[in-house]
């Protein structure tokens, strides 16, 4: 690859992510695009608007070429994925190879050479689009595990730009990462970035160790010395790998939870559920990493041994449809629905439902009302990069009441230590902690929630993106000054 000249009217800030932050509604006479509500858009939209930004990604519709367009002050550049690539690059290599490998091999990752070839091809397409979109000296911010080869590919094409990468999921210990037949290509791909961000310090440490063990590169505190690579056409540089824990849009969630309509809806939800003394909530994508089966096992046992009475306590479990064409996701759905059905069969009565189970999405306002209605939120992930649901719950608890039960294996546990922390593999411990949350005194609930909220008000998603981009900019500024020794 030989470097490309910067385009004359390029963007100064370019986001590269698997998905564009929009959805197309085809139900009317004309297709209508709407921005999908999500943390990443909220964090990046202001930066995009202030910096003549562009967002490169797939629009979510296979086999369709869509022209670039503007929405909400953002310039979107849609890339095409064929149906075959959705199967091999997205459902295959991204979600059946990397996803389980990076989440502690909870299910076995599948390694297929054809999936890898597709991943390489799609990553190359994303990198070329970024190279053609970025202005001279621009900042390019690449997101997540689907695009780990993009940083080095962009660096080879455009040595003038500054490149950041953020990994939204965990980075595995070097011993597990070792299984990946293409581990050195992935490491070299990521190390094309100037700054590589992770959710937890432990993820960044795992990555630096993998760079030492599997690529033979020297590291010093958070820095990795990346030598020249004639094969990929990238020069020598120093990459920085550090933690930048992602957060939520706290002010917006807080305001939504104070809206009188939301408050009224939260009361209505509780009364529709029969005014339980304790309403427990779980909200997860239906994914084997989220520990939904462990949660249901603990809950079912608490009902069976009479520790909780379904007339007083009720569980609302939302399991959002996800990756439904992948076999392990069909299996987890069967397991969860069987467990929920069994528990209801045994413990519900006419007028009393032990578990209210939903397998669909909810509008943002309804989610806020549910968070406001729930006395307890259960997060029992077996491994999770961060877990935004835990933070959304806290952001919505404007009354400073409510208990967060949080898995030690979610990145959020690193800095939400006022939650009731649980090991979801320890079913007896999980049961004891659910009971503890139900019985906790109001003063203790308030003390914990207040501390959680104080931190979340300071560390919101805006401060997350600011801190990542400021760090990247500072690295760029002293590029020439920084010396390895
Ligand atoms: P996810 O694995 O998707 O994200 P999470 O962080 O909990 O997990 O985010 C899920 C989001 O979807 C939340 O904003 C939640 O409100 C929303 N959601 C879930 N179910 C919904 C429903 N039924 N209706 C409407 N909205 C729903 C990945 C990583 C995480 C990391 C994030 C961000 O796996 O560990 O925190 O990226 O970096």
Image (tube, rainbow, N blue to C red):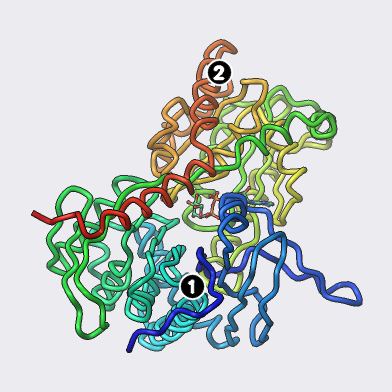
Q: Is residue 388 above or below residue 99?
A: above
Which residue is at the front of the view, 116 or 257? 257
In the rendering, at what x and y percent does residue 331 appear?
55, 65
For label 2, the residue is 445
In this rendering, position of residue 211 left or right of residue 150: left
Q: Is residue 438 left or right of residue 451?
A: right
> What residue is drawn where x is 64% and y is 28%?
397
Element under label 2?
helix
1 or 242, nearer to the observer: 1
Tell me the crowding category of disc 2: few under 14, some 14 to 19, or many 20 or more residues within 10 angstroms, Cα based.
some
Whole-percent x and y of residue 5?
A: 42, 83
Q: Name which residue lies at 40% across and 72% down.
A: 97
Callout 1 crowding tier (Cα within 10 Å): few <14, some 14–19, many ≥20: many
Give residue 104's position: percent from left, percent from top: 34, 57
Judging depth in this view, the residue of 342 and 257 nearest the camera is 257
Left or right: where 376 falls relative to 149? right
Q: Residue at x 71, y 51 (%)?
A: 358
As drawn, which residue projects farthest toward the front? 8
Of the 4 image quadrants, the one containing the C terminus is: bottom left
Residue positioned most to the left:
485
The foreground one among 24 and 407 is 24
What's the residue at 53%, 38% (across, down)?
A: 460
Q: Quadrant of residue 313?
A: top right
Question: Which-is-in-front pick, marks 1 and 2?
Answer: 1
User: Where in the figure is residue 445, as x and y percent of width and height?
Assistant: 55, 18
Which residue does the numbered mark 1 point to in the structure image? 134
């Amino acid at each position: 690859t030989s470097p490309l000249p910067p385009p004359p009217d390029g963007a100064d800030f370019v986001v590269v992510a698997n998905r564009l932050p929009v959805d197309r509604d085809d139900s009317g006479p004309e297709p209508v695009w709407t921005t999908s509500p999500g943390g990443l858009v909220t964090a990046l939209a202001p930066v995009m608007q202030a910096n003549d930004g562009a967002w490169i990604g797939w629009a979510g519709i296979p086999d369709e070429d869509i022209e670039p367009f503007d929405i909400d002050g953002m310039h979107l550049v849609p890339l095409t994925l064929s149906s075959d690539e959705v199967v091999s690059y997205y459902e295959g290599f991204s979600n059946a190879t990397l996803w389980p490998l990076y989440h502690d091999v909870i299910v076995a990752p599948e390694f297929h050479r054809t999936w890898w070839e597709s991943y390489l091809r799609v990553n190359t397409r994303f990198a070329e689009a970024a190279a053609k979109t970025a202005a001279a000296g621009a900042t390019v911010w690449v997101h997540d595990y689907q695009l780990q080869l993009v940083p080095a590919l962009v660096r080879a094409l455009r040595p003038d730009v500054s490149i950041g990468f953020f990994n939204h999921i965990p980075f595995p210990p070097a011993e597990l990462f070792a299984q990946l037949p293409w581990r050195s290509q992935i490491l070299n791909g990521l190390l094309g970035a100037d700054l590589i961000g992770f959710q937890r310090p432990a993820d960044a440490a795992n990555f630096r160790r993998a760079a030492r063990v599997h690529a033979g590169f020297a590291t010093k505190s958070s820095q990795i010395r990346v030598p020249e690579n004639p094969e990929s056409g990238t020069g020598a540089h120093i990459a920085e790998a550090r933690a930048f824990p992602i957060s939520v849009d706290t002010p917006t969630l807080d305001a939504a939870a104070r809206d009188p309509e939301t408050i009224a809806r939260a009361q209505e939800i509780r009364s529709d559920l029969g005014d339980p003394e304790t309403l427990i909530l779980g909200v997860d994508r239906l994914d084997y990493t989220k520990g939904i089966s462990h949660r249901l096992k603990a809950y079912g046992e608490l009902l069976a041994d009479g520790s909780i009475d379904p007339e007083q306590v009720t569980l609302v479990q939302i399991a959002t449809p996800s990756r439904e064409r992948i076999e392990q996701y069909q299996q987890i759905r069967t397991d969860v629905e069987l467990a929920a059905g069994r528990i209801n069969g045994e413990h519900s009565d006419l007028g009393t439902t032990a578990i209210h189970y939903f397998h669909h999405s909810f509008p943002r306002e309804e989610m806020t009302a549910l968070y406001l209605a729930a006395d307890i939120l259960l997060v029992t992930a077996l491994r999770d990069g961060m877990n935004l649901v835990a933070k959304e719950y806290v952001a919505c608890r404007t009354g400073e009441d409510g208990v967060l039960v949080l898995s030690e294996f979610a990145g959020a546990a690193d800095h939400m230590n006022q939650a009731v922390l649980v090991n979801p593999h320890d079913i007896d411990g999980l049961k004891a902690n659910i009971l503890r949350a139900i019985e906790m005194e109001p003063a203790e609930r308030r003390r914990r929630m207040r501390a959680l909220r104080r931190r979340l008000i300071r560390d919101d998603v805006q401060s997350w993106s600011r801190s990542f981009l400021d760090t990247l900019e500072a690295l760029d500024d002293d590029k020439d000054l920084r010396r390895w020794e």
